[in-house]
Amino acid sequence: MKLSWTLQEEVSLKDFLKSQGVSRRLFKTLKEEPELVTLNQLPAFLWYTGKPGDFLEVKLPDEEAGGFMEPEPIDLVIVFEDEHVIVLDKQPGVAVIPSMNQPNGTIANGLLWHYQQQGLAYTVHILTRLDRDTSGLMLIAKHRYAHTLLAADQKQGRIYRSYAALAEGHVVQETGFIHQPIGRKEGSIIEREVRQDGQDALTYYRIQERFARHTLLEMKLATGRTHQIRVHMAFLGHPLAGDTLYGGRTDVLKRQALHSQQLRFTHPFTKRILNFHSAIPADFLIK
């Protein structure tokens, strides 16, 4: 894939690409493979100076899938796709990244297959990862450069997400927040807990609907800690339905009742604001 710009002022190619958010890793590749850069369709080194009206092109290097990820045909629900990003609506019960215990059948395996069918030499760049049993919207960068730009936005809090969560019991306040630090629970590599030596974590909530024994909430993350919503709701005494890791029961749902229902971000190249919604799963709407 090629990226292109028409220069508006006299500037070194290195300084211009730095202003466009090119990562150190990509800079290193461009130095090692100068044929990837052209100025007015002629090979150019990064120390060259461009002038107003010059046409700069950069060919993105091929990427290799890391670890033990292999392409595999997986049913992916693609909500949006262009040459830079993908938005998926993930089904519950599907892991996002392969592990030693589950080397296949994941979202990452399916993405590699999807790229392979398009003739794209890309690896997997997940921006908004979801737990295995969490459903809903996910943002994926298709190539390394898009990932660099979107990761910078994510760090600055410019990728907006909200979740639907079905909590056990009756949450009293209509709106509120939970500001409690989260850390790994001693003796576990998976479970987290509220602990004073943990990382800062802030979650906002708003009640959407009340049921006989449950409360449906809209949850918004101000931080992005592992299992943050699940841990914070358990801390309040209202674990998510089906979330056995944090004290939830399975009489209503067999998986944690958490769904990524809204995703909004600025496209890293077109600069358009993209906003996506995913319907609350039917099994959340109990009576």
Image (cartoon, grey):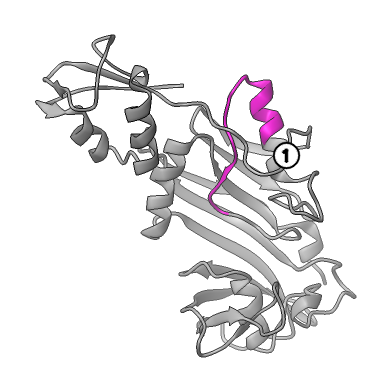
Q: Identify which residue, 108 or 264, lies in the foreground.
A: 108
- In the image: residue 244, left or right of residue 7: right
Residue for badge 1: 109
Q: Position of residue 267 (x, y in %)?
A: 41, 39
Is residue 175 in sight in this rendering?
no
Q: Is residue 226 visible?
A: yes
Q: Quadrant of residue 229?
A: bottom right
61 or 118: nearer the viewer = 61
Residue 183: % across, % down: 57, 80
Amino acid type assigned to the residue bearing label 1 in the image: Asn
Above or below, comparing residue 16 to residue 24 in the picture: above
The magenta segment:
112-128
Name the residue rendered at 57%, 86% in the picture. 173
Which type of secondary structure does the marked residue at label 1 adopt?
Answer: helix
Q: Is residue 261 magenta?
A: no
The structure residue drawn at horizontal position 49% and vertical position 78%, both measured from the top left corner, is 199
How many discs appear? Answer: 1
